[in-house]
Amino acid sequence: MQQMDPVGTCCRDLRECLLVQAELYGYDDAEIDIIDRHLHNVEKRNWGAIARDLKITPEEVVEAAKQIQKLESRPARNFTTTDDKSIAITPDVYITKDDGQWVVVDNDKGLQRLYINEGLAKRMLKDPQAKEFIGEKLRNAQWLIRAIEQRRKTIIRVTECIVDKQKEFFEKGVAFLKPMILRDVAETVGMHESTISRVTTNKYVHTPQGLFELKYFFNSAIRRTAEDDIASEAVKQAIKKLIDGEDKDNPLSDQAIVELLERNEGIQIARRTVAKYREVLGILASSKRKRMF
């Protein structure tokens, strides 16, 4: 299976994935040994350690690393352009614009509503032996139906509150996301923070800006000079934009990103916070982002 197209699938780790490809494509012994024993040194560009262990020149190591770089670390990733995070996610709520006004509607298309068969219930209640049992089950069913409807209404109310507080985000994008915490919504809708937290967990909303989990909109505040505070999610996107546009031969250090954010965006943030956000985004440190060849 590992040798089926695309070669390298069904492997347990990166090392095995690259080894399967290298052996099938006829890579030489040095290149296979480097994959087998020295991937950590390739990552650190420690050519000297590899050369000493394999008893070859550093120049040969560099040439081998160039060949290894041609292998696919994630076979089949180019088979689709679909975002992994959006696969099989059906939004619970839709946010659309109608006549200049933002409208929130729930996604209940094709969803069968629960109801009680009144005729059957009345007939069964006529049986004295079953009356108490049926009565209890009816009360449970009514409670469940009310609870589901209350949950639906709560999701709508919470989403409407988010729309009211985040209008600029829906109009202009992530850069305009405002700081917002659970308490802000809880106070507006008159519910406890824990209720808002439960309602927004694993609930997704479809917006003109894309598909988001409702929890996405709850962000801590980052201070900005001479302007309103900015949401932490917006800062993450600003960091990503800087890194996407950097010179790959001379990538930006975390400290350089700190300075650019303050100079260009007025965002005051510590270097360790940049490092934390970068890791959350799955972006490597500058030393590992530098183009190898």
Image (spheres, rainbow, N blue to C red):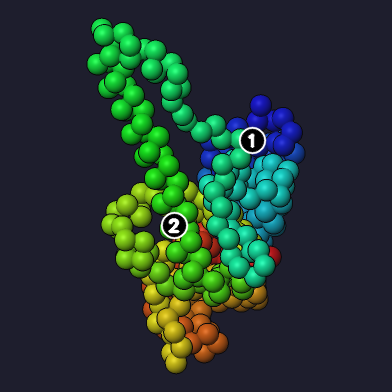
Between discs 1 and 2, the one toward the N terminus: 1
| Residue at which label 1 appears | 9
Residue at 58% from the left image edge and 60% from the top image edge = 103
| Residue at (62, 54) in percent of width and height | 56
Foreground pick, 32 / 179:
179
Judged left or right of residue 257, residue 293 is right
Tell whether label 2 touches label 1 (CB within 8 Å).
Answer: no
The kind of secondary structure element at disc 1 is: loop
The circle drawn on residue 47 is none
Image side of residue 39 versus residue 153, left or right: right
Please, what is the three-letter code of the amino acid marked with disc 2? Arg
Give the crowd class for mark 1: few <14, some 14-19, many >=20 residues within 10 Å: many
Spatial CA distance of label 1 from label 2 is 45 Å
Q: Quadrant of the C terminus?
A: bottom right
**Residue 105 at what x, y percent from top left?**
56, 52
Q: Relative to 190, does residue 7 appear above or below in the rendering?
A: above
Q: Identity of the amino acid at label 1? A: Thr
- Residue at (70% x, 36% y) in the render: 7
Residue 51 showing in the rendered view: no
